[in-house]
Amino acid sequence: MKVYEKAGYETSVFETTPKAFSARDEAARAAQDGFDLVVAAGGDGTVNEVVNGISGLDKRPLMAVIPSGTTNDYARALKIPRDDLVEAAKAINKHETIKMDIGKITDGKSRLDYFMNIGALGTLSELTYEVPSMLKSLYGYLAYITKGAELITRIKSVPVRISYDDGVYEGEVSLVLLALTNSVGGFEKIVPDAKLDDGKFSLLIVEKSNIVQLFNLITKALNNGSHIKDKLITYIKTSKVAVAPLSNDQMKVNLDGEFGGVAPMAFENLQQHIEFVAETSKMRPGSRMRAQTANEVMVKRAEEEFKTASKLVKKHKEGSK
């Protein structure tokens, strides 16, 4: 916390508990209490909880990430150091931020959740949440590779209807992936041209495939990203997606590496919804529309607060007449 205190912040620390959604609830409380910055220290699951805590609010604080999970996809996308927690915190001193797109998911009933990196459907998408937390901690990527080898042998295609901005896809699929960043499962070539703030999902649909075809696609995806041109892949940029199975087969949803329910589901991209501390100077050209400096963020917030205060003063004067 000393890094943030030296940067001019008064700090308060909350340690998550075994209670479900403790990070989400505390993030929401901090935002509603007027905190300017909320820091998520943990893995992608912790970042997801914090994002869910503040995404539904009208006034959302600046967010920062201190990565200490297995893959740390979001920190990778933000170009935050992943092997030194202190250096990750010091990113605040670079005075660089970016407004990131956030995904919103609904089931047409009471379900409402948010995700910041991936939404996926299909057997392969079950990989990250089927690996026990203890194995992730002990073996890291090896645990994922072992489980992945098991899942790919029992992969099952499902007939679906997928609606998106400019059309509809119907057919049997092995995997459906919606990505908000280019870092998926620790790899940066799965959706190589993803932009972080353009209001579009990178939608990747893998048609019905056998084991040999899937291994071929995975090899291309991990090596050079040429899989997106494969005849088994449909690759689309879209702001909205709806996925519905056309059979009684259950299609589980993966949100940022955690189980997120079952389809049918609707996804919406909330463009530039949350500002994050990031090392934008390290981002590849074209990965963002325009990054803001922390100074610009502070000036904008000051202007908004001044406008609010002016309205209150005007209302008070009118009421005293």
Image: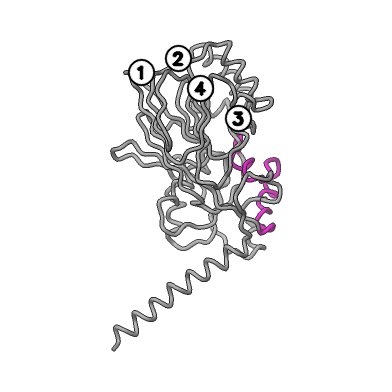
Q: Position of residue 148 (x, y in %)?
A: 56, 19
Residue under circle 2? 156
Neighbor class of circle 2 (other Cα within 10 Å; few <14, some 14-19, many 20+) is: some
Q: Give the range drawn in magenta.
A: 69-95
Q: What residue type is labelled 3?
A: Ile
Nearer-N-terminus badge (4/3): 3
Q: How far separated are the C-alphas under marks 4 and 1?
A: 17 Å
Neighbor class of circle 4 (other Cα within 10 Å; few <14, some 14-19, many 20+) is: many
Res 20 visible? no
From the viewer's perspective, tell me whether residue 219 is left or right of residue 55: right
Q: Residue 190: which numbered mark, if any? A: 3
Is 68 situated above or below 274?
A: above
Q: Give 198 or 308, whichever is nearer the viewer.
A: 198
- Residue 167: quarter of image: top left
Residue under circle 4? 206
Q: How far separated are the C-alphas under marks 4 and 3?
A: 12 Å
Q: How many tags in the picture? A: 4
From the viewer's perspective, tell me whether residue 126 is left or right of residue 137: left
Asked if disc 2 and disc 1 are in contact, CB closer than 8 Å, the reply is yes
Residue at position x 52%, y 29% in the image:
204
Is 213 situated above or below 127?
A: above
Q: Is mark 1 on a helix, strand or loop?
A: loop
Q: What element carries label 3?
A: loop
Q: Is mark 2 on a helix, strand or loop?
A: loop
Residue 86 is covered by the magenta coloring: yes
